[in-house]
Image: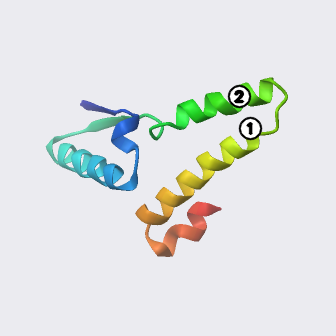
């Protein structure tokens, strides 16, 4: 079993996610793999920003979480087959 770990910069944008997928596919051809993937680059910092804002009683945590959601939806629309987008969005 080979364990592959990809940090946030490795999955920072859709083109990098595609590169990770190619690496995983190539490794899989050589045997079993386990894949560990960090959050998109910058997402952990944005989550911390949202938590700090919520803890301080500020309402801008909603905008921070909205930025995270928008980023994930954007990546999904670039990476997923169009025929599967509605099901994945749900």
Residue visible at 43% across and 34% down in the picture: 38
Q: Position of residue 73 (x, y in %)?
A: 56, 58
Quarter occupied by the C terminus: bottom right
Is 32 left, or right, of 71 in this rendering? Answer: left
Farthest-out residue, right: 57
What is the secondary structure assignment of the residue under circle 2?
helix
Q: Position of residue 66 (x, y in %)?
A: 67, 49
What is the secondary structure assignment of the residue under circle 1?
helix
Label 1, on which residue?
61
Relative height, residue 56 to residue 9 (above, below): above
Report the Cα–Cα distance between label 2 and label 1: 7 Å
Label 2, on which residue?
51
Badge 2: few (under 14), some or many (20 or more) residues near its Cα, within 10 Å? some
Is 57 left, or right, of 80 in this rendering? Answer: right
Q: How many marks?
A: 2
Residue 1 position by quadrant: top left
Give 25 or 72, whichever is nearer the viewer: 72
Q: Position of residue 48 (x, y in %)?
A: 63, 27
Farthest-out residue, bottom: 83
Among the two numbered marks 2 and 1 on one chain, the one whose residue lies closer to the N terminus? 2
Residue visible at 59% across and 66% down in the picture: 87
Q: Position of residue 84 (x, y in %)?
A: 51, 70
Mark 2 vs 1: CB contact within 8 A? yes
Mark number, residue 23: none
Is 54 left, or right, of 69 in this rendering? Answer: right
């Amino acid at each position: 079993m080979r364990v592959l770990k990809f940090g946030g910069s490795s999955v920072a944008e859709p083109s990098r996610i595609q590169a990770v997928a190619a690496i995983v596919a190539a490794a899989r051809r050589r045997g079993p793999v386990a894949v560990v993937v960090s959050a998109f680059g910058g997402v952990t910092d944005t989550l911390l920003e949202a938590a700090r804002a919520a803890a301080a009683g500020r309402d801008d945590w909603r905008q921070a979480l909205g930025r995270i959601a928008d980023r994930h939806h954007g990546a999904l629309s670039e990476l997923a087959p169009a025929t599967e987008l509605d099901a994945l969005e749900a």
